Amino acid sequence: MKQVLVILLFAVSLGGCHQVPQNNILRQQICGGYTSYRPVTEKDLAVFEQYYTGEEVLTPFEVATQVVAGINYRFRCHSLQNEVVEVVLFVPLPCNEKENEN
């Protein structure tokens, strides 16, 4: 009986995961994982400009996101040396911003 309950709970937890069509290709969306990379939007660029504190000049061109206790943004950027650099930025949920300022 215990095994049936564990299997049932596992199956129910996977119910939120499904395949997401993107660019006419079905890709597996992993619960709790990052989305597939997509082109950077103006909103993404605003996040990058607000939260990136590095000294190197970077130009983001792709982004993937992950929802946790906020949103992790994984940006792929071009550097001035024409290298591809990955930057991960954490943006807290609005209700948690004051806690993270301390």
Image: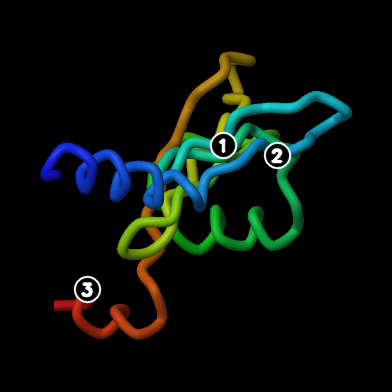
Q: Residue at x 60, y 29 (%)?
A: 28
Which residue lies at the image location 71% right of the left edge and 37% below the top edge? 38
Quadrant occupied by the C terminus: bottom left
- Image coordinates of residue 9 in percent, x first then y, are 29, 50
Residue 58 seen in the current view: no
How many dots with numbers?
3
Q: Quadrant of residue 26?
A: top right
Residue pointed to by mark 1: 29
Are the two marked residues, 2 and 3, in contact with CB atoms closer than 8 angstroms? no
- Position of 68 compared to 82: left or right? left
**Between marks 2 and 3, how big is the CA–CA gap?**
33 Å
**Where is 52 relative to 95, above or below?**
above
User: Which amino acid is tagged 3?
Assistant: Asn
Q: CA distance from mark 3 to mark 1?
A: 29 Å
What amino acid does circle 2 point to? Val
Secondary element type, mark 3: helix
Q: Badge 2 is on which residue?
A: 20
Q: Are marks 1 and 2 in contact (CB under 8 Å)?
A: yes
Q: Name the spot of residue 76 as percent of width and height, x first.
A: 57, 30
- 28 or 70: nearer the viewer: 28
Where residue 100 is drawn, which disc sits there? 3
Residue 44 position in % (x across, y down): 64, 55
**Crowding near the residue tagged with mark 1, few <14, some 14–19, many ≥20 C-alpha atoms within 10 Å:** some
Q: What element does badge 1 sit on? A: loop
Return the disc, 1 or 2, that comes first in the chain's sequence: 2
x%, y% of residue 88?
41, 40
Can residue 98 be seen at all in this image of the molecule?
yes
